[in-house]
Image: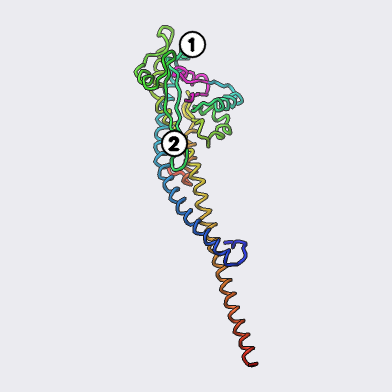
């Protein structure tokens, strides 16, 4: 470990001791933070994995239906069928502080055009409303399945978005926290300790040198008297 | 309140339009990059991106990783999952834990 480049004086030592106390306390706090972050992360990421698997299968099957529909329908008809949705979908994102990491909390809001905007009643009506936004005359049944499956997957898709983003942010923060913990543990604290020890030794050595010098001088003065 | 965007190839994501979200269907990587960047600029909260498109523009996707908004989330397309989204989760684990404990 490298000793810090400071002059061996009492004042410097006092200052370094102060820094050491702060470093040790900071290390303890950061270590605790890292442990808790890790615990939350593992919990979340397990959920994330499961959710992604489920959502991927759901979406893949919805897309397959949609592919079939697009194979039998004319592209224009298909586009027309899906282009006039009942409701517009928005997402409300709230910032939540999770172990001092800012993570999003998301919530779907459906707004039905032409109705008075009121979040609560909007959502209530929207969930009850399951009819499709097109007529059955010109469309394939596969399209109905595709839309139905997508509709069912939407909520979980948003949950996935929220959890995955949270996991990304947490992972970044865990990484930087770990670096800080390690820097303190293996660099800052040992360096400070070593420097303090060096200064203490130096001061003690000086003290001993002074004493021996005084004794020597006394010895030299004594016979003259 | 933020809007939701879905970006991917026409054959897969057009159905999302019926859900009331905005759908973009870029045909090449430049258009895809433009779509993602513009969506992020215009305040979309969540951008769902198919893995096929994401594979074309990895650096653009990476740019939004550390930001709270927008959340760029990969979804499979009609060919099924390519495993990029899963791989991203594993990468997160590796980053946080140091090694992938789920393999």
Residue at the (55%, 28%) spot, across then down: B40
**Looking at this view, is A63 or A36 the one in front?**
A36
The total of numbered circles placed on residues is 2
Chain of the residue on which disc 1 is drawn: A
Position in image of residue B92 (x %, y %):
48, 40
* Structural crowding at the residue carrying mark 2, measured as other residues with C-alpha within 10 Å and reported as few (<14), some (14–19) or many (≥20): few
* Structural crowding at the residue carrying mark 1, measured as other residues with C-alpha within 10 Å and reported as few (<14), some (14–19) or many (≥20): few
Which color mode does the image show?
Answer: rainbow
| Residue labelled with disc 1 | A80
- The quadrant of the rendering that contains the N terminus of chain A is bottom right
Chain of the residue on which disc 2 is drawn: A
**Looking at this view, is B43 or B27 the one in front?**
B43
- What range of the chain is rendered magenta? B1-23
- Point out the residue furthest to the top here: A137
- Point out the residue furthest to the front here: A225
Position in image of residue A158 (x %, y %):
43, 28
Residue B10 part of the magenta segment? yes
Q: Is residue A182 above or below residue B49?
A: below
Residue B48 part of the magenta segment? no
- The quadrant of the rendering that contains the C terminus of chain A is bottom right
Ranked by sequence position, the earlier of labels 1 and 2 is 1
Position in image of residue B62 (x %, y %):
55, 35
Residue at the (44%, 36%) spot, across then down: A96
Position in image of residue B11 (x %, y %):
50, 19
Q: Secondary structure at mark 2?
A: strand
Q: Which mark is residue A96?
A: 2
Residue at the (60%, 78%) spot, across then down: A210
Per the model, the C-alpha gap separating discs 1 and 2 is 40 Å
* Residue A181 appearing in the image: yes
* Residue A146 appearing in the image: no
Q: Are marks 1 and 2 on the same chain?
A: yes
**Looking at this view, is A5 or A59 the one in front?**
A5
């Amino acid at each position: 470990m490298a000793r810090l480049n400071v002059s061996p004086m009492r004042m410097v030592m006092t200052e370094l001791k102060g820094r050491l106390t702060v470093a040790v306390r900071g290390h303890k706090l950061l270590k605790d933070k890292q442990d808790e972050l890790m615990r939350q992360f593992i919990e979340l990421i397990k959920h994330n994995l499961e959710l992604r698997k489920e959502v991927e299968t759901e979406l893949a099957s919805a897309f397959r239906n949609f592919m079939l529909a697009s194979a039998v329908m004319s592209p224009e008809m298909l586009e027309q069928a899906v282009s006039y949705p009942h409701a517009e979908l928005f997402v409300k994102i709230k910032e939540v502080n999770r172990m001092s990491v800012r993570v999003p909390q998301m919530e779907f809001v459906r707004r039905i055009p032409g109705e008075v905007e009121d979040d609560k009643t909007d959502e209530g009506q929207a969930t009850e409303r399951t009819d499709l936004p097109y007529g059955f005359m010109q469309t394939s049944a596969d399209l109905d399945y595709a839309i139905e499956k997508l509709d069912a997957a939407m909520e979980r898709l948003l949950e996935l978005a929220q959890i995955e983003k949270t996991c990304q942010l947490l992972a970044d923060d865990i990484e930087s926290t770990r670096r800080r913990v390690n820097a303190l543990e293996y660099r800052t604290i040992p360096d400070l300790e070593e420097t303090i020890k060096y200064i203490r030794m130096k001061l003690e050595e000086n003290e001993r040198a002074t004493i021996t010098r005084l004794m020597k001088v006394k010895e030299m003065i004594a016979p003259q008297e | 309140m933020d809007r939701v965007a879905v970006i991917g190839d026409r054959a897969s994501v057009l159905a999302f339009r019926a859900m009331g979200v905005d759908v973009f269907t870029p045909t090449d990587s430049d258009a895809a990059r433009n779509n993602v960047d513009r969506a992020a600029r215009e305040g979309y909260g969540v951008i769902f991106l198919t893995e096929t498109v994401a594979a074309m523009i990895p650096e653009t996707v990476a740019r939004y990783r550390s930001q709270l908004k927008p959340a760029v989330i990969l979804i499979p397309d009609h060919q099924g999952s390519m495993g990029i989204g899963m791989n991203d989760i594993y990468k997160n684990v590796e980053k946080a834990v140091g090694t992938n404990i789920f393999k």
